[in-house]
């Protein structure tokens, strides 16, 4: 479990983004290409990336643009008709329009610090909290950050990269992009990793997301992210709609888990919601047992009613001891080894 992550940390192989920064893009005039053409070039380069990753090759630095540069360009193109997440608002964020998340074209950073509260394998984790979110969870514990996309300070990728270098000097084991949610900030995240350059060769990248990421964004994340620290919250669309105001949840999120499983390593987080043992926790465990047995699974019991949870009496309490015990029994019955 997390073999690649520890290999990167131990210096046995470079992080994925470093390999992507070493793969040249030979097509001339990228800036003038339409988005469809750019995706074709991207997909061809990703074939080379997968081969390089499998073989553990470390190509020399290219003279011209790299695969990582191309990913940056594509992320910026996506801003003009935003579909960073599956809400697919289609707004032109470069012209000041804002979609559901409310995040502008310049990301905003609520806080950055070395986080010691994440999973033990990750800490200390250099965590960048972006303002704004693609969900509206009624029990959000970070609501002050998540619901205020105009909070914090404008993000500067060069400064964020400088912070990552300083964090590495202080012992950080990874760069952890979260919020709110990282999805609306994909362009800023890729540009930060670009600015970090070769200094990040041994720094794994962590996508800490609700996984309602668009398919296009998932394609850009492959070859950049090493770990998906990923929430799998609901086992059905009704609960997702009621508590997070999101449609088509299970199809989108389960699809993205399968994609992440192919392109990186997953640390799955499942927050036990009171009264949602069977419809959510058990359903997710069954899906995991069937589709990705052996995946890192963190069953979390720390739910507490926050934000607007009091308006939903059925979740206005902590999970009971019996619910926790039953959740552990279901995991054991399905052969899920909890981390
Ligand atoms: S990130 Fe998602 S919610 Fe935000 S504008 Fe883009 S598509 Fe809409």
Image (tube, helix red, strand yellow):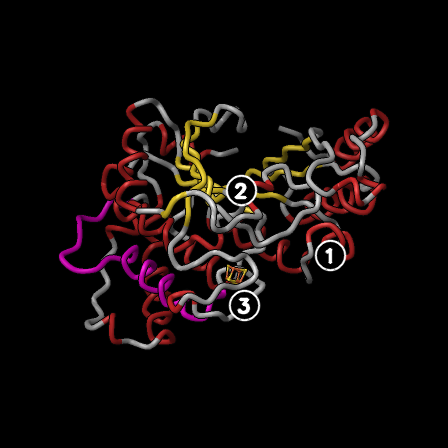
Please tell me which of labels 3 and 2 falls first in the chain. Answer: 3
State if disc 3 and disc 1 touch (CB < 8 Å).
no
- The residue identified by callout 2 is 145
**Is 216 drawn above or below residue 242 in the view shown?**
below
Where does the image place residue 332, in percent across and percent down from the top left?
Answer: 76, 31
Q: Is residue 186 left or right of residue 273?
A: left
Where does the image place residue 138, in percent across and percent down from the top left?
Answer: 70, 46
In this view, the residue in front, 132 or 14, is: 132
- The residue identified by callout 1 is 241
* Residue 261 counted in the magenta span: no
* Mark 1 burial class by Cα count in 10 Å: few <14, some 14-19, many 20+: some
**Is 134 drawn above or below residue 288 in the view shown?**
below
Residue drawn at (43%, 38%) of the image: 128
Q: In the picture, residue 253 is in which quadrant?
A: bottom right
Q: Which mark is residue 89?
A: 3
Q: In the picture, residue 204 is in which quadrant?
A: top left
State if disc 2 and disc 1 touch (CB < 8 Å).
no
Q: Is residue 276 left or right of residue 156?
A: right
Q: CA distance from mark 1 to mark 3?
A: 17 Å
Where does the image place residue 307, in percent across and percent down from the top left?
Answer: 68, 40
Residue drawn at (29%, 38%) of the image: 200
Which image quadrant: the C terminus? top right
**Is 116 drawn above or below residue 269 in the view shown?**
above
* Mark 3 burial class by Cα count in 10 Å: few <14, some 14-19, many 20+: some
For ligand 1, tell me if the residue under mark 3 lies within 8 Å: yes
* Residue 80 counted in the magenta span: yes
Q: CA distance from mark 1 to mark 2?
A: 21 Å
Residue drawn at (74%, 49%) of the image: 235
* Mark 2 burial class by Cα count in 10 Å: few <14, some 14-19, many 20+: many
Q: Which mark is residue 135?
A: none
In this view, the residue in front, 215 or 20, is: 215
Q: Which residues are magenta?
A: 57-83
């Amino acid at each position: 479990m997390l073999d690649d992550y520890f290999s990167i940390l131990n210096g046995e192989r470079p992080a994925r983004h470093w390999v992507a920064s070493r793969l040249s893009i030979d097509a001339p005039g990228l800036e003038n290409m339409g988005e469809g053409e750019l995706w074709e070039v991207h997909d061809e380069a990703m074939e080379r990336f997968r081969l390089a990753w499998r073989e553990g090759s470390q190509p020399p630095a290219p003279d011209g643009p790299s695969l990582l540069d191309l990913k940056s360009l594509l992320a910026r193109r996506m801003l003009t008709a935003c579909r960073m997440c599956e809400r697919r608002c289609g707004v032109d964020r470069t012209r000041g329009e804002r979609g559901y998340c409310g995040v502008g074209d310049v990301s905003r950073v609520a806080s950055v610090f070395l986080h010691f509260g994440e999973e033990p394998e990750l800490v200390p984790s250099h965590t960048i909290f972006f303002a704004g979110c693609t969900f509206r969870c009624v029990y959000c514990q970070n609501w002050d950050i998540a619901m205020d996309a105009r909070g914090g300070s404008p993000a500067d990728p060069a400064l964020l990269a400088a912070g990552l270098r300083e964090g590495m000097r202080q012992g950080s084991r990874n760069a952890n992009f979260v919020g709110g949610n990282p999805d609306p900030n994909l362009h800023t995240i890729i540009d930060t990793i670009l600015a970090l350059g070769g200094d990040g060769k041994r720094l794994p990248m962590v996508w800490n997301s609700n996984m309602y990421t668009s398919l296009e964004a998932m394609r850009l994340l492959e070859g950049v992210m090493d770990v998906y620290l990923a929430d799998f919250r609901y086992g059905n669309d009704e609960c997702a709609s009621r508590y997070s105001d999101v449609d088509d949840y299970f199809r989108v999120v389960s699809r993205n888990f399968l994609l992440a499983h192919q392109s990186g390593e997953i640390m799955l987080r499942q927050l036990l919601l009171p009264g949602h043992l069977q419809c959510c926790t058990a359903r997710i465990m069954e899906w995991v047992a069937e589709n990705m047995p052996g995946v890192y699974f963190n069953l979390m019991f720390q739910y507490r009613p926050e934000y607007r949870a009091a308006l939903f009496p059925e979740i206005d309490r902590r999970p009971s001891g019996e619910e926790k015990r039953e959740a552990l029994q279901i995991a054991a019955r399905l052969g899920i080894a909890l981390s």
